Image (cartoon, grey):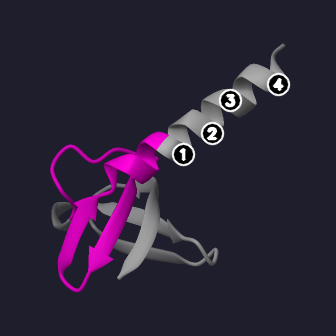
Amino acid sequence: MKRGVIDRFEGELAVLEFEDGTHETIKKQQLPQGVVEGDAVLIDGESITIDKTETKRLRDDVEKLMNELFK
């Protein structure tokens, strides 16, 4: 199983970034409906699911950093 984050969309493609810093491009249609940039995803063979717990953790981390930056 691989864990990645939706880095960006380029037309009909999605660019995923993985923990080791590598990137992979896949078709948007392969992703779960409603996925957005910044969502964490789990890839298990042909199955791709949104990791809601990791997505929330990542967003909370970014919010914390932004709050510290703009104090």
Mark pair 2, 1: CA separation? 5 Å
Q: Answer with the quarter of the image where residue 41 lies.
A: bottom left
Mark pair 4, 3: CA separation? 9 Å
**Residue at label 2?**
61
Closer to the camera, 66 or 6?
66
Give the residue at x 80% y 24%.
Answer: 68
Residues tagged 3 and 2 counted as in contact (Cβ below 8 A): yes
What's the amino acid at mark 1? Leu
**Residue at label 4?**
69
**Residue at label 1?**
58
**Range of residues picked out in magenta:** 31-56
Q: Position of residue 17 (x, y in %)?
A: 52, 67
Give the left or right position of residue 54, taking residue 46 as reference: right
**Residue at label 3?**
64
What's the amino acid at mark 4? Leu
Give the left or right position of residue 63, taking residue 66 as reference: left
What's the amino acid at mark 2? Asp
